Amino acid sequence: MPAAPRLSANHGRSAVWTDKALAARIQEAQRQLGGKLREVRLDKGFSQERAAELAHLHPITIIKAESGKANVTIGTLVALAIGYDVPLWAFFGPDNGKVPAPQQRSTRRKAGSA
């Protein structure tokens, strides 16, 4: 396996953002996450100002996160989850924090397995 290219400590901007296709996908994910953050906040009945107070964040952070214009950190997501009293994964699933129904596991074995 070839070694990954070595980057110097002064390598400049991450290749993640210079690859246009990857950057576009990241930006779309940020917009989707922002929409989910807004959805959860509105479901809880919070204004952006109240959400900022509950999560101990600046209101601009809420605005930028919900608009998809911020590269939201895990710390910000944890603060929002605590402030909104929802599990962290509520910001990522299609069902807004509701526990999905358990999926049935197949008990059939593959042919030739013991």
Image: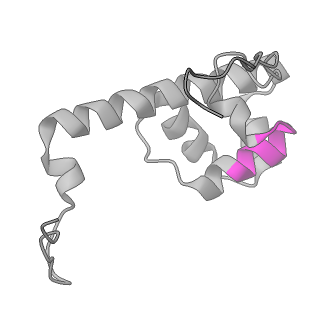
Q: Work out whether residue 85 or residue 15 is closer to the camera in this orientation and state it.
A: 15
Q: Work out whether residue 6 or residue 25 is closer to the camera in this orientation and state it.
A: 6
Taking the magenta stretch, the answer to whether it contains residue 73 is no
Q: Work out whether residue 111 or residue 41 is closer to the camera in this orientation and state it.
A: 111
Residue 7, percent from left and from top: 15, 76
Taking the magenta stretch, the answer to whether it contains residue 82 is yes
Residue 86, percent from left and from top: 83, 36
Q: Work out whether residue 44 or residue 36 is closer to the camera in this orientation and state it.
A: 36
- The colour scheme used here is one colour
Name the residue at 53% across, 30% down. Answer: 34
Q: Is residue 45 visible in this depiction of the protein?
A: no
Q: Magenta part of the protein: which range?
A: 78-87
Q: Main secondary structure of the magenta part?
A: helix
Residue 37, percent from left and from top: 63, 30
Q: Quadrant of residue 26?
A: top left
Q: Quadrant of residue 48?
A: top right
Q: Is residue 56 above or below residue 61?
A: below
Q: Is residue 50 visible in this depiction of the protein?
A: yes
Considering the image in quadrants, where does the C terminus appear? top right
Q: Is residue 100 left or right of residue 91?
A: right
Q: Is residue 25 left or right of residue 4?
A: right
Q: Is residue 42 above or below residue 27?
A: above
Name the residue at 47% across, 29% down. Answer: 67
Considering the image in quadrants, where does the N terminus appear? bottom left
Name the residue at 16% across, 81% down. Answer: 10
